[in-house]
Image (tube, grey):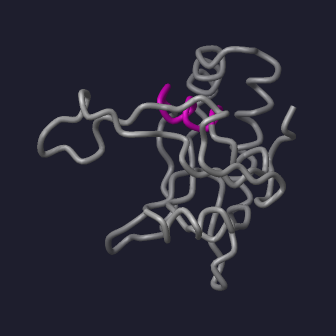
Amino acid sequence: MGGKLAKAERGELAWALPIGYWRDRGGQVVFDPDEQARTVVRLVFDLFDRLGTLNGVLRWLVEHQVQMPVRSHGGVDKGELTWRRPNRETLQVMLHNPLYAGYYAYGRRRVDARRKQAGRPSTGRVVRAMDNWHVLLPGRMPAYITAE
């Protein structure tokens, strides 16, 4: 993990980007090139600011038939934009991700061996307190919202 952490400390470790972001040909993180995708991301944060709850945002998006932009992270359709019905998990991930406020963050989760399930590599992850994240670099990413 030493090399991986060193790369993260420099803000150079790449990972799959969340909704509303894209990696350009040079490897830089930029806003999604699709204007409608960017508009929906901004709408989610505006709604949360106005309504104050994740469930309120979800209800509004569903009632107004707003679809969420999702880009495939792998396979033959890697990078292709598709539109999906919003769901609670997607919105929660967006609202808790510091990238949307311009932060490069690494080490937000740890693996709890007691919660790990055999044959399921993504299980056992537990969110760390922000003070325990390995890396948090402000102003390194394009931001949809301010840090406040």
State whether the magenta stretch is mostly helix, strand or loop. helix
Viewer-side residue, 18 vs 66: 18
- Name the image quarter holding the N terminus: bottom left
Give the tally of numbered discs: 0
Residue 30 on image: x %, y %: 73, 66
- Name the image quarter holding the C terminus: top right
Residue 41 on image: x %, y %: 70, 44
Viewer-side residue, 57 vs 127: 127
Residue 102 on image: x %, y %: 78, 51
Q: In this rendering, would 118 be left or right of 3?
A: left
In the image, the segment drawn in magenta is 87-96
Q: Quadrant of residue 119?
A: top left
Residue in view at x 68 percent, y 68 percent? 10
Q: In this rendering, would 72 be left or right of 56?
A: left
The vertical placement of 1 against 127, above or below, is: below
Residue in view at x 69 percent, y 42 percent? 98
Residue in view at x 80 percent, y 31 percent? 46
The vertical placement of 50 against 24, above or below, is: above
The vertical placement of 43 against 48, above or below, is: below
